[in-house]
């Protein structure tokens, strides 16, 4: 029976039974965490061969570059080729970075703020510049633009991507300088952009000459199911068709393919933007960690081998996603307690609690020893107008701990929902 259909007396009785379960969990003094999308130890172990692929005798690339020395500003050829195939772009349009694509994004925004882009004044002196933030979205994206004093503008996220009617209207403002995008298995809903969304992004005619699409394809190869894989048009190629490739800065990394703390990141961009990045980089570094790039190139080999590696990740991830889905369908859905998304890949599931219940659910979880992503964190400035969204990150805990965690989560969500209904 749905909680919304229960009488006050029925709700009070249900709450009493739930609080007994809740107190049992509290007495266990648990320390569980499903707050961030970190790979588990099992997933990290898939790539342990990395530790043995380069030594002093073979630290040389195919073109003869000595990786232990200075140089190679934009990356080694082998690594550039791997990412070019993943991006769907020419090798010359790729720059290889260090372990974090987020670092590359931060640098680019910093450059735009302090030095400007495309001959325009630095954003710092243009006035209150703005950035579009499809939400729920990735909190660390929004934190970058917030850090630089850029106004984050929420744009609703749909199952097909950001609300493009709103995006097309907002970019008419010359102070709107860009948009954050996670196009495939988005963080946190797990949605993938439709062909129409990609084409409309590629066709944007923003008023700002220095507008950029910050396109973070973090989960491009992170499928969960062999028979259910989302296909997304290549935005870079669609922009080339329309002569708009200057708009896009396209990012990827190996962070959730190999070892996040010591992976490799990459940027795909137009000739114009590549030249712009090089101008900054020549003052920033004398060269990247090419030894790490070489060992990654030897381990990953090519896009076909990456598929084999990611199948191993999927075998570990699938049962964890299923544990969350099973708990929702067995313990929350029958009572009308929220909704979830059903991704075909990526690292997250979104839970949408009944309006006004997300913060209370997270608080109840914390009191029992379960740390979740803070309610509202997937929205600019942490402000979810409906106090509804909670990001579930099932990857890191061992499966037995995760199953316990989602049971605590469902009990907490039920209590929060009943409390809200009793206030009416």
Image (cartoon, rainbow, N blue to C red):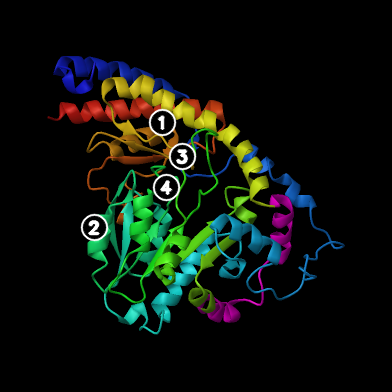
Disc 4 from disc 3: Cα separation: 13 Å
Identity of the residue drawn at 69% across and 66% down: 77
Q: Nearer the viewer, mark 2 or mark 4?
A: 2
Image position, residue 40 (x, y; %): 59, 39
Residue to which mark 4 is pinned: 186
Q: Which span is picked out in magenta?
A: 276-301
Residue to which mark 3 is pinned: 393
Residue to which mark 1 is pinned: 368
Relative vertical location of residue 157 with respect to residue 18 in this rendering, above or below: below
Q: Nearer the viewer, mark 3 or mark 1?
A: 3
In the depicted view, which residue is nearer to us: 248 or 333? 248
Q: Are marks 3 and 1 in contact (CB under 8 Å)?
A: no
Q: Earlier in the sequence, mark 1 or mark 2?
A: 2
**Most extreme residue toward the front, as rendered?**
241
Q: Are marks 1 and 2 in contact (CB under 8 Å)?
A: no
Residue to which mark 2 is pinned: 166
Relative vertical location of residue 285 with respect to residue 409 in this rendering, above or below: below
Disc 2 from disc 3: Cα separation: 29 Å
């Amino acid at each position: 029976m749905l909680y919304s259909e229960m009488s006050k007396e029925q709700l009070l009785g249900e709450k009493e039974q739930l609080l007994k379960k809740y107190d049992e969990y509290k007495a266990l003094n648990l320390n569980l965490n499903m707050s961030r999308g970190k790979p588990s130890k099992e997933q990290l172990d898939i790539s342990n061969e990395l530790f043995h692929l380069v030594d002093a005798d073979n630290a040389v690339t195919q073109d003869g570059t000595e990786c232990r020395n200075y140089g190679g500003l934009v990356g080694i050829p082998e690594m550039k080729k791997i990412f070019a195939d993943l991006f769907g772009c020419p090798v010359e349009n790729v720059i290889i970075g260090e372990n974090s694509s987020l670092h590359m994004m931060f640098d680019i925004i910093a450059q735009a703020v302090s030095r400007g882009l495309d001959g325009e004044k630095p954003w710092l002196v243009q006035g209150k510049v703005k950035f579009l933030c499809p939400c729920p979205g990735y909190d660390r994206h929004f934190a970058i633009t917030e850090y630089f004093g850029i106004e984050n503008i929420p744009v609703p996220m749909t199952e097909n991507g950001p609300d493009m009617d709103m995006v097309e209207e907002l970019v008419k403002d010359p102070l709107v300088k860009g948009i954050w995008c996670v196009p495939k298995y988005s963080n946190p809903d797990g949605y993938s952009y439709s062909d129409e969304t990609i084409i409309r992004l590629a066709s944007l005619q923003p008023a700002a000459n220095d507008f950029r699409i910050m396109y973070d394809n973090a989960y491009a190869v992170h499928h969960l199911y062999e028979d259910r894989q989302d296909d997304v048009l290549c935005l870079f190629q669609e922009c080339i068709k329309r002569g708009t490739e200057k708009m896009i800065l396209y990012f990827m990394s190996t962070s959730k393919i190999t070892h996040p703390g010591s992976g490799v990141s990459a940027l795909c961009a137009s000739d114009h933007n590549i030249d712009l990045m090089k101008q900054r980089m020549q003052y920033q570094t004398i060269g990247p960690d090419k030894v790490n790039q070489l060992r990654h190139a030897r381990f990953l080999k090519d896009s076909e081998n990456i598929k084999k590696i990611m199948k191993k990740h999927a075998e570990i991830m699938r049962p964890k996603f299923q544990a969350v889905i099973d708990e929702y369908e067995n313990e929350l859905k029958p009572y009308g307690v929220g909704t979830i998304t059903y991704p075909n890949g990526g690292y997250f599931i979104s839970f949408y609690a009944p309006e006004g219940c997300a913060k209370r659910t997270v608080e109840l979880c914390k009191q029992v020893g379960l740390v979740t992503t803070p309610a509202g964190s997937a929205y600019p400035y942490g402000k979810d107008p409906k106090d509804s969204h909670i990001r579930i990150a099932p990857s890191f805990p061992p499966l037995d701990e995760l199953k316990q965690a989602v049971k605590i989560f469902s009990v907490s969500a039920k209590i929060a929902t009943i409390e809200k209904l009793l206030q009416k």
